[in-house]
Image: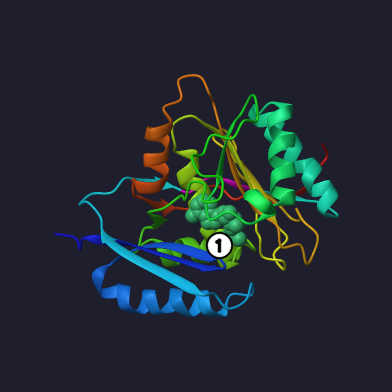
Amino acid sequence: MPDRLYSLRMRAERDGEHCSGAERIAPAAALPALAADLVARALAHNSGAPEVVHCHIDRLPGALPCRPLPDVRTYAVPDWMAGRACAKGLLLRAGVAAPAVDAALQLLADGPAPGGRIMRGAMLIDAFTGRRLEADPARGVRVSRMDLEPQARAGILATLAAAGLGHQRVAEALVLAGKVLQAPGIIAEVCWSDDPDYLAGYVAAPQVGYQRISCLKEAGDRHGGRALFVRPAGLDLPVLVDFLERQAILFTAPGTILPEQPWRG
Ligand code: AMP
């Protein structure tokens, strides 16, 4: 019988504000080293030393759903303003209405938590009106319990690296977006990091996959976050949140990786 798998979640904060986090799924034997790795990462994060590091481990049910990662394409843009225009174009193309796109991009630019702070999780946004739907606008919804399938991990990471996508952040964001795109009622996701040195971001949508944008913010900018756009018709919010936060999923293969192209609008 295959080893039972565990979810390992790390989250670090300072002054009640999110600093860093990570999600892994692994067999018991791998947990001590992985937990040490994630704690070291929380302590060394370039947002500064955290005050609290939470590490949580729980055992997952026997058989987990397995999916391939989304397809990846990269749009090269000359600067963050062109990147935001690209993100807006891709969100409109995915079916998000203009007021919802504009509201979300402004919130990400200003800091989506109260007081312009960084959220721990993602905003949930009505894709037509732009109204925020998450219960707690400081916490948001944390997409959890997803990872590369342990035995497929090395091969997938090698494929990504060979395509110039070897940065750890890309693999982690692909896994997160991969889970989001499986969720009921999701139309699109947009993300850029709160890390002042990491300027790339993405727009993901079910029909097209993960669309990486080479620059979405100015160097040194500490704002960032995630917005998940949902179709309001037929929305069952508790079911969606339960899926995003609690239902485990593994990714067993890379999607198609397309060559980088300029964004032409
Ligand atoms: P990162 O890509 O790790 O720099 O995260 C950028 C932002 O995305 C964070 O500030 C959070 O607001 C949000 N975020 C990070 N991890 C998650 C997650 N697992 N689920 C939902 N939102 C997240």
Looking at the picture, the colour scheme in use is: rainbow
Q: Can residue 258 be seen in this view?
A: no
Between residue 101 and residue 181, name the one nearer to us. Answer: 101
- Vertical arrangement, residue 205 with respect to residue 5, above or below: above
Q: In the picture, residue 211 is in which quadrant?
A: top right
Give percent across and percent down for residue 237: 43, 31
- Vertical arrangement, residue 76 with respect to residue 219, above or below: above
Give percent across and percent down for residue 34: 38, 74
Magenta segment main secondary structure: loop
Residue 133 shown in magenta: no
**Quarter holding the N terminus?**
bottom left
- Vertical arrangement, residue 237 with respect to residue 4, above or below: above
- Residue in the image at 69% along x and 64% along y: 198
Identify the element where label 1 is drawn. strand
Q: What stretch is highlighted in magenta?
A: 69-73
**Quarter holding the C terminus?**
top right
- Residue in the image at 74% along x and 55% along y: 214
Give percent across and percent down for residue 103: 71, 36
Whether residue 117 sits left or right of residue 8 in the image: it is right
Residue hosting label 1: 18
The single residue placed furthest to the left in the displayed view is: 1
Ligand 1 positioned in quadrant: bottom right
Q: Can residue 183 be seen in this view?
A: yes
Q: Residues within 10 Å of mark 1 (few under 14, many from 20)?
A: many
- Residue in the image at 20% along x and 52% along y: 62
Q: In the picture, residue 117 is in which quadrant?
A: bottom right
- Residue in the image at 81% along x and 41% along y: 85
Q: Does the residue labelled 1 lie within 8 Å of ligand 1?
A: yes
Give percent across and percent down for residue 124: 55, 38
